[in-house]
Image: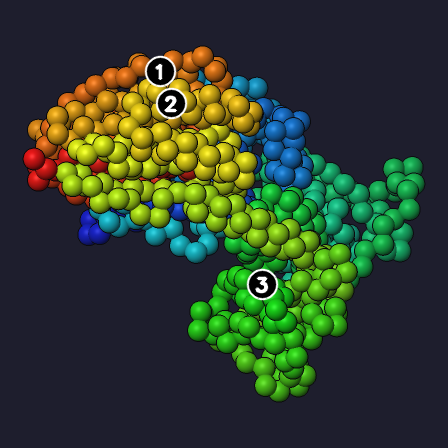
Amino acid sequence: MPSASASASSATGSGPGPEALDAVFAEAVRGSNASVGLVYVLAPGERVLRLAVVSGVVPRIAAPWTRVPVDAPVPVSDAIRERRAVWLASQEEVARRYPRLGIVLPYDFMLAAAPFEGESDAVWGGLVLLWPTWHPPTLSAQEREAITAVCHRAGVLLEQAVDRGEPLDIGDEPRALPPPRAHEPDPDEARAALDFAERIPVGCCALDMDGRITFINTAATELVGAGAAALRGARPWEALLWMNDPLFEDHYRAAVVSRRPTSFTALRPPDRWLAFHLYPDDRGISVQITPLTGESSPSTPPRTAQPSAEPGGASALYHLMHLAAALTETAGVNDLVETVADQLVPAFGPRGLALMAVEDGRLRIVGYRGYSSPFISRYDGMPLTADTPNVHTLTTGVAHFFCSYDELKRAYPGADRYEDRDAWAFLPLIASGRPVGSLVLSYDQRRPFPPAERAVLTSLAGLIAQALDRARLYDTTHQLARTLQTGLLPHTLPDIPGLDVAARYLPAGHGVEVGGDFYDLIRSDPGDAVAAIGDVQGHNIQAAALMGQVRTAVHTHATAGTPPAHVLARTNRLLIDLEPGLFTSCLIARLDLSRHRARIATAGHPPPLLLHPDGQVEVVALSPGLLLGIDPEAHYATTEIPLPSGAVLVLYTDGLVEAPGIDIDAAVASLVAGLTGHRHRTTDELADLFIAHATAHTPRTDDIALLVIRRTPEHP
């Protein structure tokens, strides 16, 4: 059998497809002896991991993690951000370090997560593996080597596909690797096995990994009171009314995830107690059913099961808890919409989702999934007086469920139908007694919406309403802070003869408040110019406000012709007098255009890069200086360097090179390597190159400010 790497390299045409990744993944599962595995892919420029392949469980159980933000508090995200393996040796450790994971999978298992790294510094996804708790408390050397090797091969595979301009198409839904092939019995063996199952005096049945009955013997059908034809292909807790209790489904989930035998008892009305023993493996679950009589019968009263349909079982309850936990971590409205869609659509089955919020007496679309933009735009800005179900559910505060399009059409003759959607739920979003919006779910097929499902969806709407209210407040506050920060940065840079300058400012990624990065280019004495860049500690409005004060002080002193070291010293004393409680890094470069020199002083700021006219790149060595705002007596040294025509000076804040799990020296070296050979590029092209390099594959948690300055030959 060819190896995964051979499979990938032997592909023809447009390159290896998803099956190449499947082969690498299968090798990881085999080499590590894992019982469950998941593969995540991170597309270039995205901040969301997409579940591509699963093994050992069905995608339904993995539904809460179909799409995972890179900064989510889950093991695979941590492994990718920090570029290291994560190992969880017990259920207790899972619950302590990752409470949300412990809520949805409260079972015994061990877990490892590791990143996919290729030949470059990029991370392309990650691997999650689970083992039963009888696995030793640490991974063996062989298992670690297998995981490391497979993660590297997967990283190279994904990286090469992107480099060719043909990233792997992982599809809209995760693929499930087939279980290991079982022994194929000959006809005589099959008949003998069937005869054996029919002769034994206990009930037995087989479930596939999705919990559906694939075989049941006569003794079992007599014990549960239903025929084999009605049970085959169904899940027991759905086909048997007296087993319609989340507790029973939970035992199945526990067996699948933990790979440990489990058992429970159930009362078949009116008075027959049955014991169920579940024995899981990689292909499914074998179930033994025996009657309990006399003293062996439980003395506790039975739980009364009520008729319901999915999503009213254990999976729905866990998904509900998972969504509740996820919503507490959302920030703005966009983040909320992504979280709701990522969790609700795969877990509860709607084909389409539209989230609307009240704004100035109208319903505004704040997010959607499963609809085309032209269709959804018809409903954006709908007045609250409109005769539509999404408005009525908001104004009345009552959820409306339509089991079919005919039912919707009778109630609202003018209702539009999107594609072949045939069932709808219109849910009001009420927060603190106030209507804040509505949630519309649509389904491909008719749906009865039994009471249990309506209760779950109503609970979901309540959680989403509270989160939407918080998210809109967050967005308002965040926008004010961003407006403050951008208002304090220069709108344009002066046109100075002899200099070609490009500037960039990139706010930090998702969930991070406004920062204090700044830059400036200042006219000074004739033949001189001053470039400044800095970073105020913190990510809040206070940092942005202090940034404005620091930039004003630097600008004032630089305009007066003050040498760089004195600019820093005077600004340092100002900060100490203000007592802001925040420190600031800053770098000042006075560019003497007539002498082709630059004098640079730094206060704890990253050193600049210098691209020489011959294409060589160096990190400018500077005498380190203390951060501003610490010591009023701090002194700062000045370093003078040549700045010939054609040379490029690059000033940047640490957000360009710092990221979790990345050594800053290695990051600067990578930046130098990326700049080498690009001396003919314009300053704008160079600036874009830097930003693309910094943001391509590693999520950023800090702002980036950048100045690219070329000494042009036109100046005398």
Q: Is mark 1 on a helix, strand or loop?
A: loop
Is residue 477 visible from the viewing direction of this image?
yes
Label 1 to label 2: alpha-carbon separation:
7 Å
Q: Which amino acid does label 1 sit on?
A: Tyr
Q: What element carries label 3?
A: strand
User: Which is more toward the observer, 394 or 524?
Assistant: 524
Q: State if disc 3 and disc 1 touch (CB < 8 Å).
A: no
Describe residue 296's horizontal placement relative to residue 580 as left or right.
right
Considering only order in the chain, which callout, 2 or 3, is on the residue closer to the N terminus?
3
Is residue 126 visible from the viewing direction of this image?
no
Considering only order in the chain, which callout, 2 or 1, is on the residue closer to the N terminus?
2
The residue at 49%/38% (across/down) is 544
Q: Mark 2 — residue?
A: 568
Describe residue 562's horizontal placement relative to residue 214 as left or right.
left
Considering only order in the chain, which callout, 3 or 1, is on the residue closer to the N terminus?
3
Q: State if disc 2 and disc 1 touch (CB < 8 Å).
A: yes
Q: In which quarter of the image is the N terminus?
A: top left
Instruction: Give the number of the disc on residue 355.
Output: 3
Instruction: Give the number of the disc on residue 15.
Output: none
User: Which is more toward the observer, 705 or 676?
Assistant: 705
Q: Mark 1 — residue?
A: 636
The residue at 15%/31% (across/down) is 593
Density class for disc 1 (Cα within 10 Å; few <14, some 14-19, many ≥20) is some
Q: What element carries label 2?
A: helix
**What is the total number of numbered labels drawn onto the structure image?**
3
Density class for disc 3 (Cα within 10 Å; few <14, some 14-19, many ≥20) is many
Q: Where is residue 263 in the image (x, y as percent from the top left)?
A: 73, 38
